[in-house]
Image (cartoon, rainbow, N blue to C red):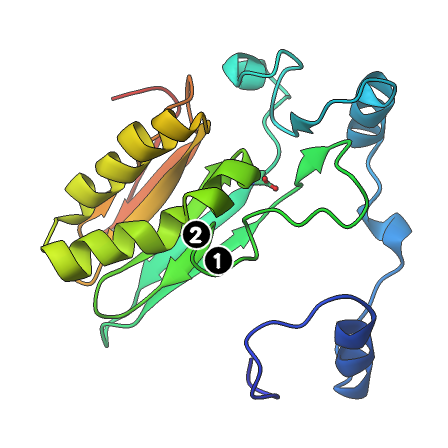
Amino acid sequence: MEKSEHVMMIGAGAERFAKMKDIELVDPSYFYTETRFKQLQQIKDKEKTQLDHDGGTGSNENIFIEGKKFGTVGAVALDAYGNLAAATSTGGMTNKRYGRVGDAPIIGAGTYADNSSCAVSATGHGEYFIRAVVAHDIAALMKYKNYTVKKAADEVVMKKLVDFGGEGGVIALDKNGNYAMPFNSAGMYRGVIKNGKAEVSIYKD
Ligand code: ASP
């Protein structure tokens, strides 16, 4: 972001650029974990994909089993100067096709930040989040329709996304520090830190 004028670079070109800029690269084996490998073996013969935090049922209901909470890490933040930022890291979908791109890196789908509206990071079935342009839609409702962050996030996650058939949720934060964390799945691991106080939750409030 600081070393080129581009917004997004991928694949071999991005790796070549990273090397040129002396960014540390690791071997793919660095990302290997036994649990994820086993999940892949279990689903490999089926023409199916699965969220890495699914329990295997295709719904998120088993993510609450002890030791099964891995997958997306998303963050949104507001600094003292009013700058909003969002970041999303994902394990993607297990058994996805080679070359499949999820919503996490796509600006406006799984990740978005704009100082005039809000910062959003999403988790869930990426194909639907891309189709519904979830993160930008929340920002647009705030910007053009003056929705609060809660109303905008609820509208997109609990109505539009549900109509599309997409399961998941978002964390969203506005320029005044108001936030919303709606999800249409059984639960979503989430936390907030405000004025030095941390709170975490899994199920609906
Ligand atoms: N949204 C991600 C994807 O579809 C999955 C996740 O929630 O981590 O790739």
Position of residue 56 measured from the top left corner of the image (x, y, whole percent): 67, 14
Residue plotted at (53% across, 44% down) = 73
Q: Is residue 195 something that shows in the picture?
A: no
175 above or below 159? Answer: below
Q: Amino acid at mark 2?
A: Ala
Mark 2, residue position: 75
Classify mark 2: helix, strand or loop.
strand
Q: Answer whether labels 2 and 1 touch (C-beta < 8 Å).
A: yes
In the rendered structure, the answer to whether residue 112 lies left or right of residue 96 reads left
Sequence order check: which comes first, mark 2 or mark 1? 2
Classify mark 1: helix, strand or loop.
strand
**From the image, which quarter does the C terminus lie in?**
top left
Mark 1, residue position: 87
In the rendered structure, the answer to whether residue 140 lies left or right of residue 26 reads left
Gap between marks 2 and 1, in whole Å? 5 Å
Residue plotted at (58% across, 82% down) = 6
Position of residue 144 measured from the top left corner of the image (x, y, whole percent): 15, 60
58 above or below 24? Answer: above
Instruction: Sort mark 2 into few (<14), some (14-19) or many (20+) by Cα contacts within 10 Å.
Output: many
Tell me which image quadrant ligand 1 sits in: top right
Position of residue 18 measured from the top left corner of the image (x, y, whole percent): 76, 78
Of residues 34 and 146, the one drawn nearer to the viewer in this rendering: 146
Q: Amino acid at mark 1?
A: Ala
Q: Residue 97 is drawn in which quadrant?
A: top right
Q: Residue 86 is drawn in which quadrant?
A: bottom left
**From the image, which quarter does the N terminus lie in?**
bottom right
Q: Is residue 70 something that shows in the picture?
A: yes
Instruction: Sort mark 1 into few (<14), some (14-19) or many (20+) by Cα contacts within 10 Å.
Output: some
Which numbered tag is attached to residue 171?
none
Position of residue 111 measured from the top left corner of the image (x, y, whole percent): 45, 55
Residue plotted at (49% across, 37% down) = 128
